[in-house]
Image (spheres, rainbow, N blue to C red):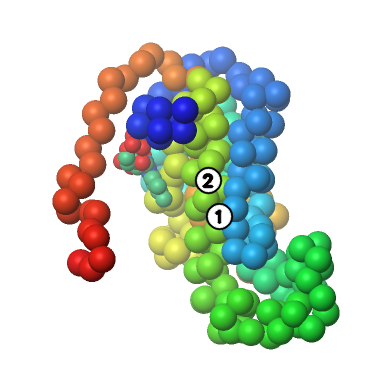
Amino acid sequence: MVMNAVTTRKSVRNYSDRPIEDSVLNKILEAGRFAPSWVNVQPWKFIVVKSQATKDLLSESAGGQKQVKNAQVVICCVADIQDWDKSRFGKVLEQRGLDNDTKNFMLESKLYNPANLGEFEALMRSVEQLTYAVAYMTLEAHELGVGACIVGAFANELTKKDDELAKKVKSVLGLNDKQVLVDLLTLGYEAESVEIKKFRKPVEDVVFYESL
Ligand SMILES: Cc1cc2nc3c(=O)[nH]c(=O)nc-3n(C[C@H](O)[C@H](O)[C@H](O)COP(=O)(O)O)c2cc1C
């Protein structure tokens, strides 16, 4: 089942006018919420955007990519480095049933809490976690017959493109400087089926045993 979804999923960029039912959208969001993460920290927020004005702004920030403005829904996928703060991360560790000494050890450790290394490291790790959630949502969308495209080429702290536009997007989405919009997940039913051409590097270029 999973392999079938993995191999038949494709980026869908042409959407019909058919709205996405809330029950379907909720399942896609649930797939993201249930994704695995580092010590279960879940440093992500998903902002569901349906407003045309915001989709237009996001599309502009993505160099005019049409699938962003034409999507029925854009899920704005945010990495939130505040989730590594001792109070929030501590709560997660408590929920895991860790005793106080172990919890405090992990919160103070550079190995378990990347925030102790600095904001860059915390952001890197947050983006890493968010990626699983985005991948899960993409697969669930595919399973439900909803087309999806991950969009990463837009103005933000990672691309360093167009600071002014990036700030405007952050303000419209209500993000602070510890919250980074990493991916736009554009969703909609496919307008007309486009044949998939899957280009992937051959196995011998990417899979190695014991060493490179
Ligand atoms: C992190 C990330 C960012 C991406 N950004 C864009 C983008 O800005 N615009 C776009 O059209 N596709 C984007 N894609 C989609 C890729 O181009 C696509 O996944 C890849 O070409 C493989 O095709 P497939 O998804 O149909 O298998 C992105 C994919 C990922 C994972």
Q: Position of residue 44 (x, y in %)?
A: 64, 55
Q: Position of residue 187 (x, y in %)?
A: 52, 30
The amino acid on which the numbered mark 2 sits, given as a three-letter code, is Val
Element at label 2: helix
Q: Residue at x 62, y 77 (%)?
A: 113
The amino acid on which the numbered mark 1 sits, given as a three-letter code, is Leu
Q: Residue at x 67, y 38 (%)?
A: 30
Q: Residue at x 52, y 50 (%)?
A: 132
Crowding at mark 1 (Cα within 10 Å: few <14, some 14-19, many 20+): many
Image mark for residue 134: 2
The vertical placement of 92 against 194, above or below, is: below
Q: Position of residue 72 (x, y in %)?
A: 56, 26
The vertical placement of 88 against 184, above or below, is: below
Furthest residue in direction front, as rendered: 210
CA–CA distance between discs 2 and 1?
6 Å
Image mark for residue 130: 1
Toward which corner of the image does residue 86 lie, by quadrant?
Answer: bottom right
Pick whichever, 181 or 144, lies toward us.
144
Q: Quadrant of ligand 1?
A: top left
Report whether the residue tagged 2 is closer than 8 Å to ligand 1.
Answer: yes
Q: Is residue 144 visible?
A: yes
Image mark for residue 146: none
Q: Are marks 2 and 1 in contact (CB under 8 Å)?
A: yes
Q: Residue at x 77, y 63 (%)?
A: 96
Q: Is residue 69 visible?
A: no
The vertical placement of 148 against 60, above or below, is: above
Pick whichever, 143 or 71, lies toward us.
143
